[in-house]
Amino acid sequence: MPQNEYIERAQKLHGKRLDTEERARKKAAREGHKASENAQNLRGLRAKLYAKDRHAQKIQMRKTIKQHEERNVKGAAEEKDPANPIPAYLLDRANPTNAKALSSQIKNKRNEKAARFSVPIPKVKGISEEELFKVVKTGKKIAKKGWKRVVTKPTFVGPDFTRRPVKYERFIRPMGLRYKKANVTHPTLNVTVQLPILGVKKNPNNPLYTQLGVLTKGTIIEVNVSDLGIVTASGKIAWGRYAQVTNNPENDGCLNAVLLV
Amino acid sequence: MATVAPPPSKRQRREEVERATIQQDVTPISRDDLGSFKANFVDSDGNQLTNVIEINFGDATEKNVSVLLNTLLGRDRDDFTPYRFRIHIPGKDIIVDQYPTDLLALLQKHGVTNPFETTITLSAEPQSVFKVQAVSRLAHRIPGHGQPILAAQFSPVSSKLLATGSGDNTARIWDTETGTPRHTLKGHTGWVLGVAWSPDGARLATCSMDKTVRIWDPETGKPFGSDLKGHTKWVQAMAWEPYHLWRDGSARLASAGKDGSCRIWIVNSGRTEHVLGGHKGAISCVRWGGTGLIYTGSHDKSIRVWDAVKGTLVHNMTIHGHWINYIALSSDHALRTGYFDHTKDVPATEEGKVEKARERFEKAARINGKIAERFVSASDDFTMYLWDPTNNSTKPVARLLGHQNKVNQVQFSPDGTLIASAGWDNATKIWNARDGKFLKSLRGHVGPVYQCGWSADSRLLVTGSKDCTLKVWNVRNGNLAMDLPGHEDEVYAVDWAADGKMVASGGKDKAVRTWRN
């Protein structure tokens, strides 16, 4: 997951190649030939992977075709009552209820006291400070002192962060390992949206990691859900919700999280 | 270092104390030499009320002018009616709705070069003599329903009884004074989509997803007669016959729903009198007017007007571009409450009741001395139309433009001078009922506004929204009078009792809430 839109930026600055469309068209036109060649000539593990991929593609294609066929059928759709009772003026309306269902579910869950502190990933593997921090040894004076550390795991750094003067900077959080957005999944609705991170609420390993904004598996982050239109009980739009990181971002290069309800 | 001022000297301190103790003379230099104007009082139909009288600008506050008009009309102090005035700017077509604090400045702003000695027309609108207090606190949270509450209505008799319909297939009657359930009306096999009290308060009708309408006796909670079967799909709208039109010793009830037909039932015998067919889509709203016309608005984009006695089609209006969501009559409040009014004296005889109900209807529907029952239709095409079916047939009086999304509900104020519309664009808008002009927008909700309800004195409006709150608005200045959070989920139904004491609301969180001041 690129953390910046560098391709778009480059295109905005310098424009596209003049023959972009032509190349894209030709590439698309060759696709069938390429697929055929691969299917015939690949051997071993590659062939296996290729076949698996192609199999999934074909299933998807069939599904799409079926959907189109269903859409073309004329006649009344099958009538069925919505699951939740709704007033007369909302009947027959195609309601975008997902975000709403999400918020009511959160409320219902809150009522069950036991569920209040439960999280999807209850136990995490401990991460020692030796693993997380690398001692900076460059430079004469710094090597002598040996108190400067580089954080080796992905971090979230707030938008208003300014670095301290180099002389006093104890922890360095590398730019390449910073994340601003997370792919947040709603557990029961099975929808995933990319949301901006607002902050790191708790890293279960160490309070210091929380302070540094280290993102490891099991970390609770706060994400910005204002786009989903969830409303609080007092009638204001809910802004932040907590989510738990479900993957090892250092291995995957992306940050996946599950919303806590 | 900043320079620090020395502490005040003794003399300065003494003078300060003196200035604080002696009351300043704040009477204006002279209010008499502001000049005067001639006031010509007319009623809302344009008829002159009294002779032209000269008023000093210094004294021309709205309250003073109101007292003056009452005195000129020869009323006793006890019978004074509060008035609001609209100012017609002389020589122009402009009418100012809001009475200013400084009348002279207003006239000069509108380019009246010499306001002195000119005749200014003031149209006087009588206000209700009683005042409803804005509800401010949660009186009761009454759990009981097992599913979301889909409809709520107060009894026309008093705010003591409240009926709600729910998704748990029951309707319930609540005693709002004690916050306890009175009766559970079981019988429906589908969600109860609507509840409607008869104008005399002696019957309750419920309509349901199970294609039937049921009539109940609210005193005992027992069904009255058997269920009214006939619709082929769910029933979502009902309207009782206005009390002064009841014939043959029985009330009638119109019900309509998804199947596009509107059926008129004779309540006492449970027989179908007419089936009004013709709509091609679901009927979303039905209204029974005091002149014997039935109005139906449908998802097939048309509004049809029917003759209730003969069961024939009178008009078909197809001007809207999308579904009709709601129809409101200018006499809705009078028809709903029948012969009950704020004085609480109910006529003893049957004839007296009918007469009083008729009188109240005619008072509500009279425009320029004629009975002109108007209605306004709200639609999914973001607009509303104002109609005058008795006099102006199929041409709309005005088109009400301004909402930026679907308009879900529209309500006439009880005195018939204002229209409130609630829309999916999170706004409630206030319109002039006479000419359909836009007056103001009430913004504050962060979700679609589903329902709105007027207080009986037309001064306050309550709105319920998807954002889990109710809000009470002061209609005159458009300010938020009270924000009422407390619901845990969407608010589906809101009703303000006819006597103004209480607001009831219900929604997805399954508990009925009543609010009072």
Image: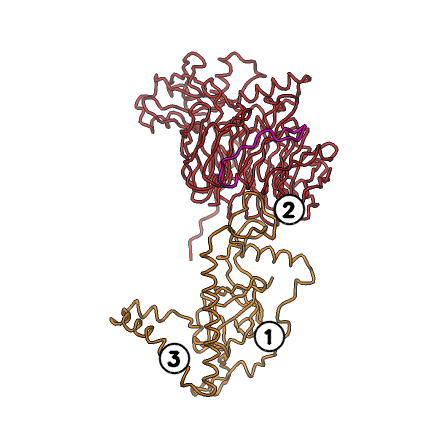
Chain colours: A orange, B red
Point out the frontmost of discs 1 and 3: 3
> x%, y% of residue B487?
61, 47
Q: Which residue is mark 3?
A: A36
Please name whichever residue, B336 or B61, is drawn nearer the observer in this view of the structure: B336
Segment tinted magenta in the rendering: B266-282
The residue depicted at 45 percent of the width and 61 percent of the height is A68
Instruction: Output the chain of dot 1.
Output: A
Labels 1 and 3 within one chain: yes
Distance (Cα) linking label 2 and label 3: 58 Å
**A146 on left or right of A113:** left
Residue B130 is situated, as x and y percent measured from the top left of the image, at 58, 25
Q: In the figure, residue B470 lies in which quadrant?
A: top right
Judging by the rendered image, the residue that carries numbered circle 1 is A206
Magenta-colored stretch includes residue B280: yes
Label 1 SS = loop
Quarter of the C terminus of chain B within the rendering: top right
Amino acid residing under circle 1: Asn
Task: Tell me how far mark 1 sits from mark 3, CA to CA.
Answer: 54 Å
Q: Are marks 2 and 1 on the same chain?
A: no
Residue receiving disc 2: B167
Q: Residues within 10 Å of mark 3 (few under 14, many from 20)?
A: few
